[in-house]
Structures are given as structure tokens and as C-alpha cells.
Image (cartoon, coloured by chain):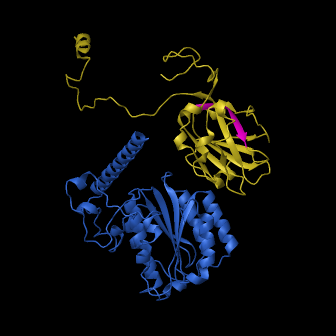
Chain colours: A yellow, B blue
Amino acid sequence: MAHSGPFRCECGQLHGLEFQGPSNDLLPYIDTPGVSALNESVGGACRRVFKPYDQRLEHEGFVDSEDDDPQLLLHIPFTCPVNIRSLHLVGGEEGATPRELRAFVNHETLDFSDAELMPPVQQWDIAPTDPTGTLEYPTQFTRFKNVTRLYLFVANNHGAEQTRIRYIGLKGTGTDHKREAVKNAVYELKPTPETNALKDQTSARIG
Amino acid sequence: RRQAVKGRLGDTGAQCCTAQPHAVLLYSMVLEASFLVIDNSNYMRNGDFAPSRMEAQLDAVNLLSGAKTQSNPENTVGLLSTAGKGIEVQVALTTDVGKILSLSHGIKIGGEASLTAGIQVAQLSLKHRQNKNQRQRIIVFVGSPVKEDEPTLVKLGKKLKKNSVAMDIINFGEEAENAAKLEALKNAVNSDDNSHLVTVPPGPHVLSDILLSSSIIQGEDGAAAAAAAATGGGGGEGLAEFGVDPNMDPEFAYALRISMEEERARQEAEAAKSATGEAGADG
């Protein structure tokens, strides 16, 4: 079982900072290699924005939008369905922080025209400065249940030509439900005595 | 980089087929949906590309659709024409190259080409592709003067880049007149060298041959896509390495290709490991 819960888990350690009750850092559930973004200036930079909460202020690892275009569309897949409670964001300096952030849940794919036309599941107005990244943007929790894919659309920023995001943190709970193929299965056309383990009990009941 | 790929089967002495002039060398395997945008305006009646610009274009369509589907069997290709009575999608995205070949010969010549409208329809068709894991690419043939001005083209190019659509442009026929505009368009779309502009110089040329050696088929580092299957009118005679005809037995050819790539990757990993091991031992 995964290291979960505030009590001592199987590995023998107490897991302190990660678990604060109903809202845990969802970083372990984010499928980081599958994170992608549209309109980022450096391909693949979006993955570095997902880091542990205590590293959120570190200066390497940020994503910029293209020159003279503040919009950005981030695609975040999860390894299992999660329930998202809140969002943390550390943006860039001097107006390069996002202003309106819109979330779309569980779409197979989105591009900018879809993101602009469709009503978002939720929209947040991000503060112009939050240098310590402690502002928490809560979600309307009922709409963010069983999320397998999250799209975050940065519609505009606070006046700069580019948008920069240094850190995105998602808090909530994961479900650990996985869709996996059945691993150990015996397929048979008709039951045979070798594979039928219950044969003794069954005959006892019938007889 | 033209490597003769020797996989596990290379060790058993299987013969490489060298009869074809353009032997298959490396497969690129990028999963991609490509939309071909062709020019069917009146300029295509011109005979400067034998037998006519239209025929040369269709031959190139043949080549490209074969190359794309050979390089990855899940790739899809579509076709639309930009002139005539209006933008018309001739073939929706499909893995079936035969459909493209049979329908492309029914395209009527006439009217004037609307380049931006054609590109926009192609972009929309790519957006609604079935397999969302495929990358998006538009391959445009420009053989008549471009009506639109450069700022319009640049704006369109930026929109394509923003939505992660790559573009290859083939400038033939009126290449001097269109050179600046198409160069600007390619620079606007280009992101990390994923887009190319091929300008066909004046003079008698076979369009397909020029494309064969260009970066559209070759890719950025010279890795050739399966050119052999595309030539010869639909790929009936294309032969891959090991003498296995990919059209007769595509799954076998595919399996061979995968095993070779794995072997090559394994050898490269071992070489890298032994190189760092030596460096560590020396240091």
C-alpha cells in the first residue's frame, strides 16, 4: 500500500509534512512525463513546474509562454482519479503572473479555441504578487471529483508580454483506483478438475 | 546520418535488399496525422513540370502519403484542394493510402487557390482527428501566386504554432514570386525545427525526386522515411530490408522494424555505458 495516512505506515516512518488531513499534496498522483503545454516557449518546461511544496520558491524550473503572447494551456494527467481541493500558484515577477486561470476537467484534448469558447469548470482571479506562494485558491470541490485530466488555461496576465509560472501545486485526495489489466487469470472453456480448487467443497454441498 | 541498421537479424546473415535505388534505411516512427493541401488552380495546367504541374503534384502526394504511412502504420493522411469551386476536403484523415491515390485523380483543375482558407480547414480537420495522440502536420503545395499578404500569413503561422501544428511547404511553379511570403510563413510556424520549406528551383525537375531527398521525407537528421514503398504507383513493389515486402506482410515487417530499433537502442545504451565506464576507470 502507498505511504498514506498520518500514522506510521509499513515503511516504518512517520510521514509528516505531506499529510495535513483531508488535503494532501497531489504531486505523487501527477503523471509528470505526461504533462504538456501549448504555447510554451521551451518545449517540456511545463514539467518542471510540478515540484514538492517546500521547493516551490526555487528559481530553476519555470515555464514561460511565447514572446508577446500571455496565454498558456497546461495539460495535467493523473495516474488515478483524484479529488482536487485547492490550487497553489507561484507566478513570475512584474506582471508576468497569470490573471485569469480557467480549469477544464476530463476532456480528452483541448486547444486554445476550445478553451476560450467553452465555459470553464471554474475560474480563479490570481493575485498579482504572491512571492511566497502561500495563497491557496480553493476549488468548488463537487466539480473536481474523479479528475483524471486537468487543463489549466491562462487567459491573460497582469500586463507583461509573457507569462511565467514557477510552481503549481494541487492539493486534494487521491483514490488509488487503477485501471489495470487482470494479471493472474485462468481462462478456460469448461471447468477442469485441475483448475477447479473448490471441487471438494462443492461436492460436499451438493452431496 | 545514414546508418545501415543491423538488428538481431543482421547477425544471422539475412540479405539486405539492394535492388531498389532508394533503399529503406531508418524509420522515424513519429505518430503523426498529416493533412496534404494541394493547389488545383488553373496554374496547374502548366507543363513546366512534366507532364503538367498537377500530375507532378499528384505524384508527390503519392510519395508523401506512402512515406507517412510506412514510417508508422498508425499515421493518418488526409487531402484537400484549395482552388476549384472552393476548399474541398477530398479525403478525410485515413490510414488507407489507396483511398488517397484513387480519389486524388478525380480532382478538377480551375479557379484560384485560397491558401489561408485551405490551411484553416486542414487545421480544423486535424483538430477532430480520432487519435488525439498523433502530432498534427499540414503539408502545403503552393504552385500559384499567393493572394494573401505576408502579415496575414504570419498571423496564421503563429496560430498554428500556438496550437502545436507543424507545417511543410513545397514552393514550386511560381517560386520566386512566393519565396518571401512562404519563408515568413514557415518561420512563423516553426518551433524547434519541426517545419520545413522546400523551394523547387526553375528548370525541368521531377518534383517527387526533389521531395525524396528533402527534409520533408528525410527528417531533420537525414533519417529516411520509407521512400521505397511510395514510388512505383501505390507501393506495390516496395521492398524493405530483409527482402520482406511490407505490403505483403505488414505485421511481419513492422515486427522486424521494432526488433531492429530495440536492438539498436540496446547497443547504443551498452556503448554509452561502456564509454562512461571507461571514463570512470580512467578518471
Residue drawn where x is 39% and y is 41% of the image: B277
Identify which residue, A167 or A175, lies in the foreground.
Answer: A167
Percent of width and height locating residue B144? 57, 82
Percent of width and height locating residue A94? 79, 47
Does any portion of residue A75 appear in the rendered image? no
* Left or right: where B229 falls relative to A105: left
State whether residue B31 is above or below residue A19: below
Residue farthest toward the bottom in the current orientation of the protein: B47
Q: Quadrant of the C terminus of chain B?
A: top left
Question: Across the whole image, how many numbered discs are drawn on residues?
Answer: 0
Q: Main secondary structure of the magenta part?
A: strand
Q: Is residue B137 magenta?
A: no
Identify which residue, B49 or A59, lies in the foreground.
Answer: A59
State whether residue A101 is above or below residue B142: above
Provide the residue span drawn in magenta.
A82-91
Which image quadrant is residue B103 in? bottom left
Which image quadrant is residue B223 in? bottom left
* Left or right: where A202 falls relative to A104: left
Percent of width and height locating residue A44? 57, 48
Percent of width and height locating residue A162? 72, 52
Q: Quadrant of the N terminus of chain B?
A: bottom left
Does any portion of residue A50 appear in the rendered image? yes
* Left or right: where B23 falls relative to A7: left
Residue drawn where x is 68% and y is 66% of the image: B155
Residue drawn where x is 59% and y is 17% of the image: A6
State whether residue B256 is above or below residue A87: below
Identify which residue, A119 or B200, lies in the foreground.
Answer: B200
Residue drawn where x is 47% and y is 65% of the image: B78
